Image (spheres, helix red, strand yellow):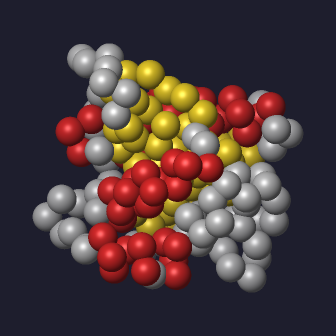
């Protein structure tokens, strides 16, 4: 396995977070939506717009050449503009994306753990996410303590208690 490291996300990482939203949206490599379509859609733009707002936090994974290979971040969204994994006011939603070549190599797990530690230290008791039906990442999320709280025809909402 190639080496990688994790560092906190910065304001200047917004462009890479957009790339990771596209990766997350296109987890099925045989059903890829164009980058501009994903970024322009309101349903995905809510995870990027105004990055790094107060309350936003995240981490990037970097390869041995310091190139970003994945990112995970959270943001709290209002009831009036909920995300896919919205479960309530004041509960942050986790967004994660990893470049396909780096999937199943521990990158996502490391990012999820860092985000969880940070969210707990920031005083959050829960964190949520959404995962589409059939996405193999659901097994990773379960192994990291997330449980399905709402199952839908297209996606499930999962929540983790942070301690």
Q: Quadrant of the C terminus?
A: top right
Instruction: Residue at 50%, 26% (x, y): give it.
Output: 6
Instruction: Residue at 45%, 81% (x, y): give it.
Output: 41
Decide if residue 161 is in sight here. yes
**x, y percent for residue 162:** 73, 36
**Image height check: is 150 above or below 70?**
below
Instruction: Residue at 23%, 60% (x, y): give it.
Output: 28
Q: Quadrant of residue 30?
A: bottom left
**Image height check: is 104 above or below 48?**
above
**Image height check: is 89 above or below 27?**
below
Q: Nearer the viewer, residue 147 or 73?
A: 73
Q: Is residue 67 left or right of residue 114?
A: left
User: Disc count in the image?
Assistant: 0
Q: Nearer the viewer, residue 41 or 160?
A: 41
Instruction: Residue at 25%, 74% (x, y): give it.
Output: 34
Decide if residue 133 is in sight here. no
Q: Quadrant of residue 57?
A: top right
């Amino acid at each position: 396995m190639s080496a990688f490291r994790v560092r906190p996300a910065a304001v200047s990482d917004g462009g890479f977070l957009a790339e990771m939203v596209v990766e997350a949206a296109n987890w099925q490599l045989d059903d890829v939506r164009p980058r501009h379509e994903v970024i322009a859609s309101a349903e995905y733009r809510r995870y990027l717009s105004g990055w790094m707002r107060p309350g936003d936090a995240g981490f990037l994974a970097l390869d041995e050449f310091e190139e970003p290979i994945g990112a995970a971040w959270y943001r709290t969204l209002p009831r009036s503009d909920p995300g896919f994994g919205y479960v309530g006011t004041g509960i942050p939603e986790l967004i994660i994306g990893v470049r396909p070549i780096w999937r199943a190599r521990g990158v996502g797990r490391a990012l999820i753990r860092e985000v969880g530690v940070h969210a707990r230290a920031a005083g959050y008791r829960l964190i949520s996410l959404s995962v589409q039906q059939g996405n193999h990442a659901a097994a990773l999320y379960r192994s990291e303590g997330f449980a399905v709280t709402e199952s839908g025809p297209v996606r499930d909402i999962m929540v983790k208690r942070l301690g």
